[in-house]
């Protein structure tokens, strides 16, 4: 069989293309062996492979971008950015809601958003741990919420009112009773997660099961692409990781909305509402000075200097007189002085 070049029907490079190819080889942008192969095989950078000069033209100095097939990036940067925005709002609202419910300072912050495979997610989890599986009724896909034991046990101790957490923390799975107590933390988190996702599309998430051994979570094949959102949950002086695993099957119905959200940025109204809730919760924890005023009188400096031991001051009020409760020096309530459990107390009767 005659060679294509001998038949004259192979791709022909014009003079401009030849000059550009020689210049690239001399400057080092294209190695000489690659240039020779490109010119001889008829698949040069200016013509299509085995085609004429009408194929797509590529720049000679364009660098190849490596692609790792073991770590496929299924979501664009805009969609990842949209997920980050949604779950930052979720973290702020969840922290404020848990603070009001537990009557203790609780902070939840988003640390990272990564794309990886399901097997890599499982390998990153300790054994044992606290995993909760969430599903949408009638919809495919399972969301995994993992609460690290380093923060799960302190939360359980706080809810049980047992004081400080044991040190070191126990290396065991949770008992059924401990799982029931931990649901006091998990259920508000799931509720806030539903609220955060409803800003793009109504979503119903329900807790369907729980697991302590990550290796038994065979809900997806090992190479299934997932998005891992890593949080830090701080409860008082304790803190630990909290992970949210979103498989592609769960995210796929929201791809169009995520692309739109990622391009326009965070809605100002949601940011204002989250900031208002967070500020209100912070103000409610500010300590103030409250005092019960039994009587008031006016004295001169001379009266004070002339006071001696066993002197008495006439208030003009009887023993059953009204007490004024002040907060930071301002009168708020009027009440009556009483005894409660062998201690003096003020029974509030009316506003000042």
Image: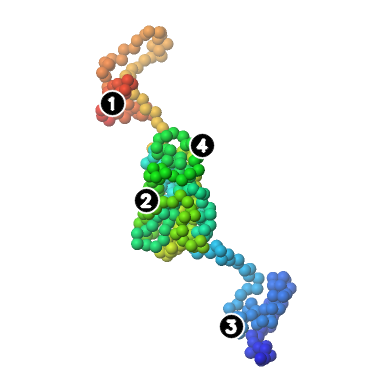
Q: Is residue 67 visible?
A: yes
Which of marks 1 and 4 precedes in the sequence?
4
At 56% from the left edge and 66% from the top edge, which residue is drawn?
69
Task: Tell me the residue that label 4 is attached to.
Answer: 167
Whole-Å distance between the Cαs marked 3 and 2? 58 Å
Coordinates of residue 195 in the picture (x, y in percent): 37, 53
| Local secondary structure at mark 1 | strand
Task: Tell me the residue that label 1 is attached to.
Answer: 347
Residue 204's disc is none
Residue 191's disc is 2
| Local secondary structure at mark 4 | loop
| Local secondary structure at mark 3 | loop
Coordinates of residue 9 in the picture (x, y in percent): 63, 89
Which of marks 2 and 3 precedes in the sequence?
3
Closer to viewer: mark 3 or mark 2 = 2
Closer to viewer: mark 3 or mark 1 = 1
- Is 61 displayed left or right of 229 in the figure? right
Whole-Å distance between the Cαs marked 2 and 1? 39 Å
Coordinates of residue 27 in the picture (x, y in percent): 72, 71
Which quadrant does the N terminus fall into?
A: bottom right
Asked if labels 1 and 2 touch by Cβ distance under 8 angstroms, the answer is no
At 51% from the left edge and 49% from the top edge, which residue is drawn?
127
Task: Tell me the residue that label 3 is attached to.
Answer: 54
Vertical placement of 279 versus 67: above or below? above
Which of marks 1 and 2 precedes in the sequence?
2
Asked if labels 2 and 3 touch by Cβ distance under 8 angstroms, the answer is no
Closer to viewer: mark 4 or mark 1 = 4
Which of marks 4 and 2 precedes in the sequence?
4
Closer to viewer: mark 4 or mark 3 = 4
């Amino acid at each position: 069989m005659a060679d294509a070049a001998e038949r004259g029907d192979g791709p022909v490079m014009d003079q401009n293309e030849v000059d550009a190819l020689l210049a690239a080889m001399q400057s080092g942008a294209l190695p000489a062996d690659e240039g020779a192969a490109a010119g001889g095989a008829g698949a040069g950078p200016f013509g299509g492979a085995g085609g004429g000069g009408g194929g797509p033209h590529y720049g000679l100095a364009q660098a190849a971008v490596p692609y790792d097939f073991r770590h496929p990036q299924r979501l664009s940067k805009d969609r990842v950015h949209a997920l980050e925005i949604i779950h930052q709002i979720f973290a702020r609202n969840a922290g404020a809601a848990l603070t009001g419910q537990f009557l203790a300072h609780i902070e939840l912050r988003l640390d990272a958003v990564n794309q990886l495979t399901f097997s890599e997610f499982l390998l990153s989890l300790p054994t044992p741990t606290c995993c909760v599986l969430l599903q949408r009724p009638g919809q495919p896909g399972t969301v995994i919420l993992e609460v690290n034991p380093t923060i799960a046990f302190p939360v359980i101790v706080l809810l049980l009112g047992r004081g400080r957490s044991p040190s070191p923390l126990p290396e065991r799975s949770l008992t059924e009773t401990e799982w029931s107590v931990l649901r006091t933390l998990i259920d508000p988190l799931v509720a806030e997660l539903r609220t955060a996702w409803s800003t793009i599309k109504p979503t119903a998430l329900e807790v369907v099961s729980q697991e302590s051994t990550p290796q038994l979570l065979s809900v997806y094949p090992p190479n299934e692409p997932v998005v891992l959102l890593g949080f830090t949950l701080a409860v008082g002086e304790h803190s630990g990781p909290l992970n949210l695993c979103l498989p592609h099957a769960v995210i796929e119905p929201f791809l169009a909305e995520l692309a739109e959200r990622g391009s326009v940025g965070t809605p100002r109204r949601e940011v204002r509402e989250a900031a208002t809730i967070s500020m209100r919760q912070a103000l409610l924890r500010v300590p103030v000075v409250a005092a019960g005023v039994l009587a008031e009188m006016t004295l001169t400096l001379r009266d004070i200097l002339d006071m001696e031991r066993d002197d008495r001051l006439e208030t003009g009020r009887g023993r059953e007189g009204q007490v004024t409760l002040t907060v930071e020096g301002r009168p708020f309530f009027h009440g009556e002085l009483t005894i409660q459990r062998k201690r003096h107390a003020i029974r509030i009767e009316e506003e000042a």
